[in-house]
Image (cartoon, rainbow, N blue to C red):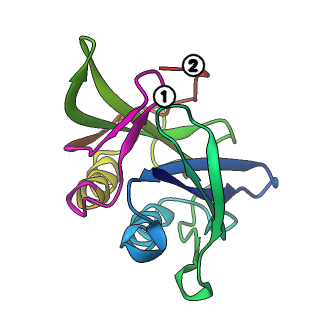
């Protein structure tokens, strides 16, 4: 079984973005909520004060081979958190995101299992479509710490399996999420 945890981001214009994270252990009994809190707290330093991120109180247990939901669970209240942006700069447009790419080193059918997280609502740290090196380095350090915590996994819907990420890389240009499956 696997478990899917949701983090909801809310912008000044009340648009919402949902990031999903997977664990092969019940996240209520692991460090996943705390690790995600630290990760989003660090990222919130690069978001306008009108942006917030919340750990959703409900998470789902699912079969990684089929994607079928088995059960819904609720986090104990002590594990719930909200992180609020602290940057004074203007937010970028709502569709703009910082892209974190996760690598697992696990290959199935000739393809590596990889993941992407689009961190929504970054502040305008530089012009010209690039993110400043200081911001990239800060988010990279947070992503690496999340990898090193070994509480998160990447789910391959196509292959019906999960794998621990072994590395993360932050793209130095603003990204926009593309819709696609494996």
CA separation in Å, label 1 and label 2 = 11 Å
Residue 93 position, x and y percent, is 68, 40
> Which residue is label 2 attached to?
180
**Left or right of residue 149: residue 75:** right
Across the whole image, how many numbered discs are drawn on residues?
2
Residue 107 position, x and y percent, is 22, 23
- Farthest bottom residue? 78
Residue 36 position, x and y percent, is 43, 65
Q: Is residue 162 above or below residue 122?
A: above
Q: Is residue 50 above or below residue 152?
A: below
Magenta span: chief secondary structure: loop
Q: Give, as a single range, the part of the protein colored magenta.
A: 147-166
Q: Image quadrant of residue 61? A: bottom right
Depth order, front residue of 48/67: 67
> Which residue is label 1 attached to?
157
Mark 2 crowd level (few <14, some 14–19, many ≥20, 10 Å Cα):
few
Q: Secondary structure at mark 2?
A: loop
**Residue 112, numbered label:** none
Q: Earlier along the polypeptide chain: callout 1 or callout 2? A: 1
**Left or right of residue 63: residue 94:** right
Residue located at (62% from left, 39% from top):
68
Residue located at (25% from left, 64% from top):
149
């Amino acid at each position: 079984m696997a478990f899917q945890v949701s983090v909801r981001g809310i912008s000044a214009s009340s648009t919402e973005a949902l990031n999903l994270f997977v664990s092969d252990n019940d996240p209520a009994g692991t460090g996943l909520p705390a690790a995600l809190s630290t990760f989003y707290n660090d990222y919130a330093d690069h978001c306008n004060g009108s942006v917030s991120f919340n750990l959703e109180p409900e998470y789902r247990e699912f079969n990684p081979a089929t994607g079928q939901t088995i059960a819904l669970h609720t986090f104990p209240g002590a594990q719930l958190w909200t992180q609020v942006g602290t940057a004074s700069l203007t937010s970028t447009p709502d569709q703009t995101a910082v892209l974190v790419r996760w690598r697992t080193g696990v290959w199935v059918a000739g393809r590596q299992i990889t993941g992407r997280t689009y961190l929504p609502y970054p502040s305008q740290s530089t012009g010209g479509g690039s993110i400043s090196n200081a911001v990239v380095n800060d988010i990279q350090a947070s992503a690496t710490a999340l990898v090193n915590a070994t509480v998160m996994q990447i789910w391959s819907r196509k292959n019906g399996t999960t794998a621990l990420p072994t590395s993360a890389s932050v793209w130095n240009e603003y990204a926009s999420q593309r819709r696609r499956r494996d």
